[in-house]
Amino acid sequence: MEIPAHIKRFAKKEGFPDVDYLGKWEGLELYSAFNEKAPFVGLPQYILSDSKETRWASLNETEEIMESRAISS
C-alpha cells in the first residue's frame, strides 16, 4: 500500500522518515513510524489516522495495539 503523503510528513516531522501501513485498528488506519538508519529503542511508534485526524497513539493505545497484533499474528 502506498503511504499517504500527509502520514509521511507527520512522521518525518518527528524524526521518523520511514512508515509502514499495518492495517485497521479500532476503525482507524494504523501505521508504524521508524528510522531504518537508527537503532530500535523503546516502544513502537504508532500513528492512528482517519478522515478527520492523524495522531500518535497514546501509551495505553500502543500497549493495546501490541497485544492485539500479537494475538492476531
Image (cartoon, grey):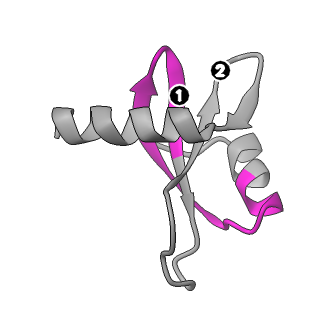
Amino acid found under the numbered disc labelled 1: Glu
20, above or below 34, in the image: above
Tell me where residue 42 appears, x and y as whole percent.
51, 67
Local packing at callout 2 (Cα closer than 10 Å; few below 14, some 14-19, many 20+) is few
Tell me where residue 59 appears, x and y as whole percent.
58, 41
Q: Tell me if I can see residue 30 in this picture.
A: no
Q: CA distance from mark 2 to mark 1?
A: 6 Å
At x 57%, y 84%, the residue is: 38
Amino acid found under the numbered disc labelled 2: Asp
Report whether 7 appears left or right of 44: right
At x 70%, y 52%, the residue is: 8
Instruction: Name the outermost residue toward the right.
Output: 13
Q: Earlier in the sequence, mark 2 or mark 1?
A: 1
Report whether 6 appears left or right of 30: right
Q: Nearer the viewer, residue 71 or 32?
A: 71
At x 50%, y 41%, the residue is: 62
Tell me where residue 65 appears, x and y as whole percent.
41, 35
Question: What is the quadrant of the C terminus in the image?
Answer: top left
Residue 50 is labelled as 2
8, above or below 24, in the image: below
Residue 20 is labelled as none
For residue 17: magenta? yes
Tell me where residue 22 appears, x and y as whole percent.
41, 41
Q: Tell me if I can see residue 72 in this picture.
A: yes
Residue 29 is labelled as 1
Local packing at callout 1 (Cα closer than 10 Å; few below 14, some 14-19, many 20+) is some
For residue 13: magenta? yes
At x 41%, y 32%, the residue is: 64
Span of residues in magenta: 11-31
CB under 8 Å between discs 2 and 1: yes
